[in-house]
Image (tube, rainbow, N blue to C red):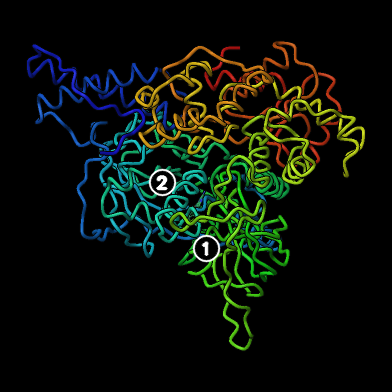
Amino acid sequence: MIKFPRFARGNEGTPGMNRQQAEARIATLQTEIRHHDYLYYVEDRPAVSDAEYDKLYRELVALEEQFPDLVSPDSPTQRVAGTPVDSFPTVEHAAPMLSLESDQDEATLRRFDERLRKGLGPDVPVEYVLEPKLDGLSVELVYQDGALLQASTRGDGRKGEGITANVRTITSVPLRLREGRHPIPRFLAVRGEIIMLAQTFDKLNERLIAEGKEPFANPRNAAAGSVRQLDPQMTAARPLHLYVYDILASEGVTGIDSQWEVLASLRAWGLKVNERIRKGTTLDDVLAYHAQTEAQRDDLGYEIDGIVIKLNDLAARETVGWTSRHPRWAFAYKFPPRKEITRILSILPSVGRTGVVTPVAILLPVELGGVTVARATLHNREEVARKDVREGDRVRVQRAGDVIPQVIERIDEPDRERAPEWRMPATCPSCGTPLLERGPFTVCPNSFECPAQLAGRIVHFASRDALDIEGLGDETSKLFVAEGLVRQLPDLFDLQAERLMELEGFAQKSATNLVNALKKAAHVELARFLYGLGIPEVGVAVARDLARHFGTFANLREADEARLQEVSGVGPRMAEQITAFFREPHNAEVLDALLKKVDLIETEPSARPAASVLPLAGQKWVFTGGLTHLTRRDAQEKVESLGARATGSVSKSTTVVVVGEDAGSKADDARKLGIRTLNEEELLVFLRGNGIDV
Ligand code: IVH
C-alpha cells in the first residue's frame, strides 16, 4: 500500500449514522478534504495540521467502508484506485496538441517578434505572456462536469495513450475542479506538463543504481517512465507534479479572452499554474525574462529548457493563425543545451563522506548550459562496465538541474585504439585500506580515520542546507584534514585565524572571514544541524521533519525506532539507520563534543511536517535599504518561512531584491541583471497573499 504522507489509513467509525446522514457527512468531508488538498498540494500553504487532516480523512474512509455504494470515483480516498493494466488505451485528444516553433537563437526570436507585429498591424498593441518552458511530459486532462474523466499523453498530437489512473495519483491534479472565477464548465480539456522534481529524480536514480538497474538519463524520462507504469501504485510511489498552461477545448466557458485569463481561470479551478508566469510587451521584456529565468534555472528544483512567449490576446491569435504544426503566435526561446560531446582525460576513484568510492570522469572542459564542466560522475564500477567507457574515450555528457554532470554514453570511434578497461583500485586511494564490494558499490570501511571521508563530512557539514559556512569547500576541507588541523568535526570550531594564515591560499582577511563564519554558524537551527551530520538516509526534508517532530536534539537522540517512525516519511529502514548512527560509540563521542561547540536553535515540536515544496523553495532573496513597516530581520525571516534563502549580495542567481528606502548599489545591480525587485509595499502585498500576517 502506498503511503501518502497525508493519507492516513484507519477506521474510526461513526456509529449510529443512517444512510442519509452518512451521505451528507461524506459530501461535507469530501469538500473539506479537497479544499485542504488544494491548499497543501497546489498552493503550498496548508491550513490545518496533519493530525486534523488525518482525522477528517479517517472519518471519510470509515464512512465509505460502512456505505461502499456511496464511494464516488472523485472521492479523495480514490486517488490510487486503479488496478494494474496490460497496456494503455489509445485516446483521441479534444483538440490537436500542437508543438511550438523553437530556437535558442536571439535572431530567430527577433524575426518571430517582427513577423507577429507585422501580421497584427501597427494599431494592435502586442502583449506577451511569458512562461517557463517546462521540460517534462505533455499531457491532456479532460474534466466532465468538474470531475476528472480522462488523462492522456501527447502521443502524435492527435492521439495519445490513456494514463488516467496514473495521473489521478498526482496530488496536484484535482479529481474535481473547484468553483473558480468562472463556473465549473460542462467540459474542459486542458494541457499541461508532468514533471519530476530534481530531488525525486536523484533519489529514484540512486535507488535504481543501488538495485543494479539502469538509471534514467534525465527527470523528463523518469517522469515519462513513471507515468507509463502499468501499475498505478508504482506511479504513486514516485511523486510527480503537473503544471497546466492551456485550455485545449471547453464547453460552457465564457469571458476568457486572454492567455492571462486562461491561466488565472485554471488556477482558480484548482489546477496548478506555474508561479513564474509574467507579462511583457517589448522584445527587451522577453530578453530580460529569458536571462533572469536562465540565471535561476539551477535553483528551481525542476528542469526547464527555455521560456515560452505567447500572444496574450486570444482574438489577435486568430489573426495570425497557425501552420499545420504550430501556432504563429507563440515561440519557445530555448536555453543553450546542457548536453555536449567531450573526451574523458582520466577516470579517478573519489572517496565520498560515506566511504563509497565513485569513479569520476575527468573531462576535457566543456560548456554545458553556461557552466564549464570538467568532471562527471560514473556512479559505480558496474556503470563504468555497462557504459564501457575508458580513459581517452569520446563521450556525451549532460547536466540536468542541479544534478552532478553525468556521462550519458560513449561515442564510437572505430579507428581509434582504446585504453584498457578501467578497474577500481584494490585499496582506498585516500587511506590505503583494502576496499570492500557492496553490491555494485565499492566502499572504504575505514569510516572514522579515512581522510577523504572526513573531508567529505566537513564539506557536507558546511554545505548550503546544513551550517552554510562560506569558504569551507572541498579544497579547504582537504587542506585542513591534510594539515591535521581538523581530526573531527568539532575541531572546526577551534580554528584560529593566525594558524590559518600560515596555510597556502589564506590571507588575513580570508582567515578571519572563515573563523567568523564558523562562529556565526555555531548558532544553528536543529534541522540544519541534523542534516549536516550526514546521518545515512537523512536528507534536508527528513531532517526538517525530524526537527519539527522532536523539537530538541535530546528528544530525537533518545527516540527508538517506533517513535522515529511516527514522523511522516520515516520508514523502518531509515529509523534503523538513525538509531544505529546515534548508538555507534565513535559517533556518540563526536556528537557530545560537537554539542559543546554549537548553540542549537530548538523549537517546540509540531505535528505538521514541512510542506514538500514551499512557495519560495530554491529562491534567493536579497534585502537592501531600510524598511518602515517591519525590520529587515523580520522580513527576512518571513520570506525564509516561505522557503526562500535571504542572502547578502546580489548575483545572477538572486531571485528577488527587496528595495527599501535609501537603497544602495544592490538595487542598481538588480536592475542591471534584470532581477525582479519589490518595494516595501509590494513585499507586504506579497507576504499577505501568501498567508503571512504583516
Ligand atoms: S504551449 C500550441 N507552454 O514544450 C502551444 N508548451 O513544443 C502548445 N511546454 O510539447 C504548447 N512548457 O509540452 C507550452 N509553458 C508552456 C510549456 C510548453 C513546456 C512543452 C510542450 C510542448 C513543447 C514545445
The residue indicated by pointer 1 is 381
Residue nearer the viewer, 651 or 26: 651
Percent across and percent down for residue 130 are 59, 45
Residue nearer the viewer, 555 or 491: 491
Q: Give the quarter of the image for residue 91.
A: bottom left
Residue nearer the viewer, 490 or 619: 490
Above or below for 664 versus 265: above
Does the numbered disc 2 mark a residue whose Cβ is under 8 Å from ligand 1? no
Quadrant location of the N terminus in the rendered image: top left
Does residue 618 appear anywhere in the picture? Answer: yes
Q: Amino acid at mark 1?
A: Arg
Q: Are marks 2 and 1 in contact (CB under 8 Å)?
A: no
Q: Is residue 66 left or right of residue 409?
A: left
Q: Give the quarter of the image for residue 78.
A: top left
Quadrant location of the C terminus in the rendered image: top right
Residue at the image position 38 percent from the left and 52 percent from the top: 139
Residue at the image position 48 percent from the left and 16 percent from the top: 555
Residue at the image position 66 percent from the left and 69 percent from the top: 344
Percent across and percent down for residue 252 are 31, 39
Q: Give the quarter of the image for residue 320.
A: bottom right
Q: Residues within 10 Å of mark 2 (few under 14, many from 20)?
A: some
- The dot on residue 45 is none
Q: CA distance from mark 2 to mark 1?
A: 48 Å
Q: Residues within 10 Å of mark 1 (few under 14, many from 20)?
A: some
* Label 2 element class: strand
* Label 1 element class: helix
- Report the label total: 2
Q: Amino acid at mark 2?
A: Ile
- The dot on residue 247 is 2
Percent across and percent down for residue 250 are 34, 45
Q: Is residue 11 left or right of residue 409?
A: left
